Amino acid sequence: AGLLRSRPAAAETGAESDPTADLYPVPRNEAYQLDRAVTAEELATTYNNFYEFGSSKDVVDEAQALPLRPWTVVFDGMVEEERSVDIDTLIRAMPLEERLYRHRCVEAWSMAVPWSGFPMKALVDYARPLGSAKYVRMESFMDKEVAPGQRASWYPWPYIEGLTVAEATSELAFMVTGIYGKPVPKQNGAPLRLATPWKYGFKSTKSIVRFTFTDRRPVSFWEELQSSEYGFWANVNPEVSHPRWSQATERVLGSGERVKTLLFNGYAEQVAHLYEGMEDERLWA
C-alpha cells in the first residue's frame, strides 16, 4: 500500500496534448477477462520499470522529459517496402480496442491493466513482411539528452526486444497506445509500447521507434546484458525459478496479496501451441 502516489496531472503525463486523445476511450473487447481486480490507475501509472529514466520504480518525473511529437515509426528489413510513418497516422489507421490483461514482472510482482491499442497482427500486416521473415526486432527510442539512464555505458542501449513472427501475429500480442481510457502516459511507454501478457514484463518494450523484420533471432537488451538470467523467450513459468528468486508466486500491486503464478501467466490456452516441439529451447526466461 505504501507504493501508492498521487497520480500526475494530465499535463504532466502528456495526455492533455496528445493529438489522438479524441479516440479514447475505445470499445472493450470482452473476450479478455481477468481473475482479479484491475489495478488502481494511480498505482499502475506511478510504479514503473523504465531503465532509460532510472533504475528505481519512481521515474514519473524523469520520464516527462521524453518528447512524444514528432514521433516516427520505421518498418524495415525483410519487408516489401521499407517506410516510415508518423505515429498519429499509424494509430488512426489501426482498429483500436481495450483489453484487460494481467502483467507479470520478472521481479515477481504483478498488476492487471486495461490497455488500449490494437492487435500486433494488424501492425505486421501493415508492415507487409516477406514470407522469409521469421522474427520482429523492436527498437526503442535513443536520446541521451532526455534519458539519463542511457548515459550509463554499461547498458547495451538502445533497448532491443524481439518476437517470432508467429508470436507477433498471435491472438494475445498487443500494441499499446492507451491505458485507463486515455492515451498512455510517458512513464508507461508512450506513444507506442508492446504488451505480451504471457511473457515477463521486460519483453513488453516501451516507446518503440523501429520494427525490423529479419530471419535472424534478435539479441534482446537484458539477454545481451545478462544472458544467464534473461533469455529471448521469457515465458512465465512458476516452476522455473529465476537464478536469484522463486517465480512460484507474485505480489499483486495494491492488494497486499501474494498469489500463485500461472503457467504462461494464465494464457496457456492461447499461446502454448507456439512452443510445441521446442523442448530444447530455454523457454522460461
Image (spheres, rainbow, N blue to C red):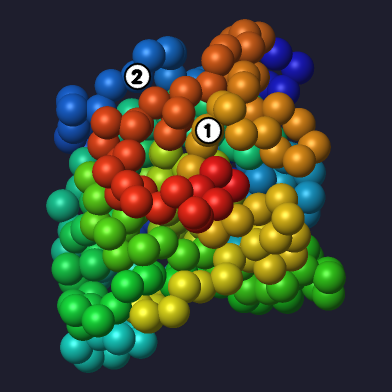
Residue 76 in view of the camera: yes
Above or below, 64 relative to 76: above
Above or below, 18 relative to 195: below
Disc nearer the start of the sequence (2/1): 2
**Identity of the amino acid at label 1?**
Asn
Q: Residues within 10 Å of mark 1 (few under 14, many from 20)?
A: many
Residue lying at 53% horizontally and 33% vertically, measured from the top left: 237
Above or below, 16 relative to 252: below
Residue lying at 19% horizontally and 88% vertically, measured from the top left: 80
| Residue 12: mark in rendering | none
Q: Nearer the viewer, residue 214 or 139?
A: 214
Q: Nearer the viewer, residue 120 or 78?
A: 78
Q: Position of residue 67 (x, y in %)?
A: 55, 67
| Residue 237: mark in rendering | 1
Residue lying at 65% horizontally and 62% vertically, measured from the top left: 223
Please tell me in which quadrant of the rendered image residue 198 appears.
Answer: top left
Q: Residues within 10 Å of mark 2 (few under 14, many from 20)?
A: few
Q: Position of residue 3 (x, y in %)?
A: 72, 23
Residue lying at 56% horizontally and 27% vertically, measured from the top left: 238
The image quadrant where one finds the N terminus is top right
Q: Secondary structure at mark 1?
A: loop
